[in-house]
Amino acid sequence: MSCELHICAACAQEDKTCCQTCEVYATPADVQRIAQYTGEADFTEFVVPGAPVYYQFADDPIWKEAVFCDDGSRRILKRKENGDCRYLGSHGCQLPTEVRPLVCRLYPFDFNEQGIYDKLAKGCPTHLLRSGQTLLQALDMNREKAECWHAQLYREVRQEPAYLAKQATHPETVGS
Ligand code: SF4
Ligand code: SF4
């Protein structure tokens, strides 16, 4: 089946979307941007990942060192009781693009610190694409934009307070 709806709207009609199933890591700067936009203060929590996919950082040591605390948790957006992202509204994300967490902006690009992978993440329903349309076209995304966000993400990851503290006290044990 192809569709005339935006692919994310069609996706929502078919099954749970990424905004209903994903645990969304927020950088310290994401938190600042969201707080400034929404006026909220208490919208994140530290949680140990609920699925193995969030532990796939064998090729990304900085992600493990900077994003994860010693107890294995990391900062994510709080979710509604039904599991939806707190910022998911009836017409999609209620945050403007420039305020959304960087990992949301990048999805479905998959990446490590070195860069963006050639293959996209598998979560989007590509069977809903119109004939001849690519997923990136349907999502109005392009690699150039994603590369800017990717660079910004890793700059911001390096500003995690616990990581900065580790660097200050044990610079020999953490990456640069
Ligand atoms: S980005 Fe992909 S998984 Fe998320 S709502 Fe859109 S189509 Fe669905
Ligand atoms: S912040 Fe927006 S894009 Fe990200 S998961 Fe929540 S609703 Fe979806």
Image: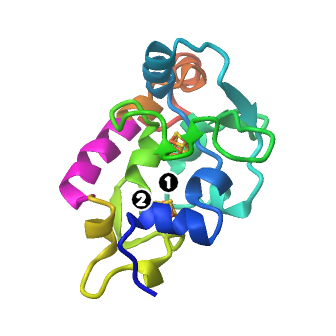
Kind of residue at disc 2: Phe
Between residue 64 and residue 6, name the one nearer to us.
6
**Residues drawn in magenta:** 141-154
Specify the quadrant that holds the C terminus. top left
Alpha-carbon neighbours of circle 1 within 10 Å: few (<14), some, or many (≥20)?
Answer: few
How did the renderer colour the structure? rainbow
Judged left or right of residue 48, residue 54 is left
Marks 2 and 1 sit apart, C-alpha to C-alpha, by 9 Å
Locate residue 146, reporting x and y percent.
28, 52
Kind of residue at disc 1: Asp
Q: Is the magenta stretch mostly helix, strand or loop?
A: helix
Between residue 121 and residue 78, name the one nearer to us.
78
Judged left or right of residue 131, residue 30 is right
Residue found 57% across the figure and 36% down from its top: 87
Residue found 33% across the figure and 33% down from its top: 98
Q: Does the residue labelled 2 lie within 8 Å of ligand 1?
A: no
| Residue 57 visible in the shown view | no
Question: Tags 2 and 1 in contact by the CB under 8 Å rule?
Answer: no
| Residue 132 visible in the shown view | yes
Q: Quadrant of residue 15?
A: bottom right
Alpha-carbon neighbours of circle 2 within 10 Å: few (<14), some, or many (≥20)?
Answer: many
Between residue 26 and residue 160, name the one nearer to us.
26
Locate residue 41, reporting x and y percent.
61, 13
Secondary structure state at the residue bearing disc 2: strand
Q: Name the residue under label 2.
A: 111
Residue found 50% across the figure and 31% down from its top: 27
Foreground tag (2 vs 1) = 2
Q: Is residue 140 above or below residue 72?
A: below
Locate residue 79, reporting x and y percent.
71, 38
- Judged from this view, the residue extending furthest toward the left is 144
The label shown at residue 100 is none
Q: Name the residue under label 1.
A: 60
